[in-house]
Image (cartoon, grey):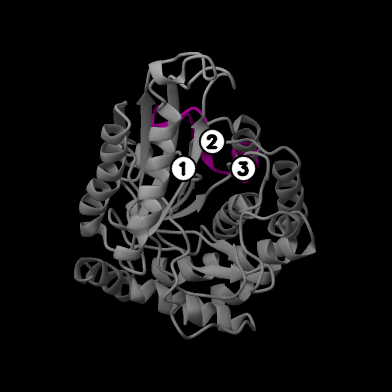
Amino acid sequence: MKAEKLKKMVPNILETFLPDLYELSNLIFQNPEIAYKEVKASNWLSSFLKENGFSVKQNVGNVKTAFKAEKITKKKGPSIAFISEYDALPELGHACGHNIIATMGVGAAAILSSLASEIPGKILSIGTPAEEGGGGKIKLLKKGVFDDVDAAMMIHPSGKNEIFRPALARVKIFFDFYGKPTHAAASPEKGINALDALVSTYQNISLLRQQLPDDVRIHGIITKGGDALNITPEHTQLVYLVRTKNKDFLPELTTKVIACAKGAAISHNAKLKSRLDSLKYDPLKRNTTMETLFKENLKALGESVEEKISDIPAGSTDFGNLSYKIPGIHPRLKMVAPNISAHTPEFEKASGGKAGKKLIALGSQVMAMTAIDLMTSNNNMKKVREDFKKQI
């Protein structure tokens, strides 16, 4: 079969790119940039793609640090996109491995580019900023950046090889409480304490959790607690992330959480202003055909696969929104021990070390091989589209 012949060429092709891919990953790792400020990372990735024969557009979708690179082959066929993320976490740098995700994405695209004369269709590498809460893919979706894409894929570093792990629908809620300032010691009875209203909200939400389904996650931070110790707080702020596997339950859950704040504000005679972030994350939509192809290619490279699908969601991702627009997969491959969580110093260390390099090589290959399966088989793409229509 043509696909099998081409896939056997992938490891040797990868070797020609590995030094550049390792350098790219290290540069991004050593220069962490948070959401929508990933100027260096976007430029480095774009330059690599240009050097390897891609036509690259930056600032796509009016997002400064987004890019879209394409290479059109001589024959008509499907458009397959490899997704790169490259934003860092505040304080923790690349403790989610986005330097690895970014590099695997362009690595797979480069491998496939070397086979462009043998495969039909369009090879795409799309740089999507601000996954860590900024909803970069959602903004790009709204601007039509993915309108010409038939299927998309990316890989996330993890503690084991999982072809699918559920993600949570998610919304961010901002709460502002307003009271009345006074001297906290001389005349406390004359004030209205906005911090008390905030603390009561925090407690109310904590109590609400026991009445909610097991898949719900609610967590927040105080972004403003007051201005001075001797002044009754006039203005305080609290931000929450509210998550659930059930996309349809998210509006009701959001209402319950806001009700906790409303009740707290009333009880302390404070005023409340709440608002929702417009960038809501969707859960992941599965595509079993793409998952199966990916799994078989992973096994062909000598890797074992966790067969049981985890019931524990892996946070939220704006790739979920993309998976409702076009067929896509978001598998997770082992980089750390199973007991090490993302968003920790241990995970960050692995992202910049030997484990990260190993994953770059593996991930680039398995995505390129999966894309070959899609681009050389009309039947595979037909099944992919059918799966997409069937999945809720």
Query: Which residues are drawn in magenta?
Result: 46-65
Name the amino acid type tagged 2.
Ala
Q: Quadrant of the C terminus?
A: bottom left
Percent x, y of residue 161: 57, 76
Q: Secondary structure at mark 2?
A: loop
The residue wearing badge 2 is: 35
Residue 213, given in percent of the width and then of the height, sits at 31, 67
Above or below residue 17? Residue 223 is above
Quick check: marks 1 and 3 in contact, CB under 8 Å? no
Secondary structure at numbered mark 3: loop
**Front one among 123 and 101:** 101
Which mark sits nearer the N-terminus, 1 or 3? 3
Q: CA distance from mark 1 to mark 2?
A: 8 Å
Per the rendering, the mark at residue 100 is: none
| Camera-nearest residue between 281 and 377 | 281
Residue type at mark 3? Ala
Is residue 143 visible in this depiction of the protein?
no
Tell me: 21 left or right of 205: right
Q: Is residue 153 above or below residue 98?
A: below
| Residue denoted by label 1 | 133
Query: Measured from the top left, where is residue 212 in percent x and y?
Result: 30, 64
**According to the image, label 3 marks what residue?**
88
Measured in 3D between alpha carbons, the distance from the residue under mark 1 to the one under mark 3, in whole angstroms, is 11 Å
Horizontally, residue 225 falls left or right of residue 142, namely right
Are the two marked residues, 1 and 2, in contact with CB atoms closer than 8 angstroms? yes
